Image (cartoon, helix red, strand yellow):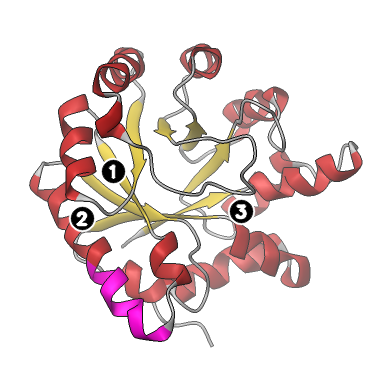
Amino acid sequence: MVKLGVNIDHVATLRQARRTYEPDPVAAAVEAQLGGADLITVHLREDRRHIQDRDVELLRQTVRVPLNLEMAAVKEILVIALRLKPEMVTLVPEKRTEVTTEGGLDVCSAPAKMQRFVAALRDAGIITSAFINADKRQVDAAHKAGFEICEIHTGPYANARSGKIQTQLQKVRLAGQAVINHGMRFNAGHGLNYQNVAAVAALPKISELHIGHAIVSRAVFTGLRQAVADMKSAMRNELK
C-alpha cells in the first residue's frame, strides 16, 4: 500500500497571515494522523514564512508517525535537523521569491556539497531524500551522493494539459524505475490532488506520496481528518 505523507505547511501559512497562535500545525498533525496520515511533512524555510522552529520542536515531540523535514541544503537548517533528528530529511531547492517550490533539486550541479549534507544526516541516523525532477541524470547523481530516497517532482504532471498528461506521467514512471534500479526508495509529490493522484499512486513500486495544499484546501470545508481520509481513498481510486 502506498503511504501518504501529509504536508501541513499551509496550516502555518494561515496562522502567519495574522501572526497569531491559530490554526496550530501541531494540532493539524494530530488530526492528520487520525485521518490516516502515514507521515507528517513540514518545510522549515530559511525565511520562516510558515513553519517556525517551535513548530518543528513540538512536532518532533508529539507526532506518532515518522516526521519528514524538508529543508534547503544550508548549514543553519542542517544544525536544527541534526539536533532534532526527524526520521527523514528531504533536501529541496529554495528561492525567497517563489510562492511554492518551483522545481527539483539540482544534485548534478553540486555533488560534493550534496555528499557532505547526506553524510552528516546519515551519520545522525536520519534517512535522506532528494526532491528532484523526473530526470535520470538527477537520479544517478542522487544515488552517487548517497541519498536513500528520491522524491520525484510531479508538478509538470499535475499542471499538464490533457494532451500531455500521459507524457508527463510516463516521465515520472521512468524516473521512478531508475530510482528502483539504483536500490533507492521511489517517492513522489507536488501538485497532486484528489483528481490526479490515483494514476501516480498506481505506478510500479512507488512507496510514498507527499501532499499538502490540496488536503489543507479541502480541509477548509470538511475538516483535516476527513480531508486526509478522502485523499487516501482517492489514492486507491475509491473516492466517491
Highlighted magenta segment, given as a residue range = 162-170
- Circle 2 SS class: helix
Amino acid of disc 3: Ala
- Which of the labelled discs sits on residue 150, or is there none? 1
Q: Where does the C terminus fall, quadrant-wise?
A: bottom right
- Res 154 quadrant in image: bottom left
In the image: residue 214, left or right of residue 164: right
Rendered location of residue 55, percent (x, y): 69, 30
186 is within the stretch colored magenta? no
Is 164 magenta? The answer is yes
**Of the residues shown, which amino acid type is indicated by label 1?**
Cys
* Residue 175 - label: 2
Q: Residue at x 74, y 43 (%)?
A: 12
Give the residue pinned by disc 3.
32
With 166 as the anchor, is 82 left or right in this view?
Answer: right
* Mark 2: few/some/many CA within 10 Å (<14, 14-19, 20+): many
| Dot 2 or dot 1, earlier in sequence | 1
Q: Earlier in the sequence, mark 3 or mark 2?
A: 3
**Image quarter in which the N terminus is found:** bottom left
Q: Residue 48 location in percent, x, y?
A: 70, 29
**Looking at the picture, how far across and down is residue 200, in whole percent?**
34, 68
Circles 2 and 1 in contact, beta carbons < 8 Å: yes
Mark 3 or mark 2, which is nearer to you? 2
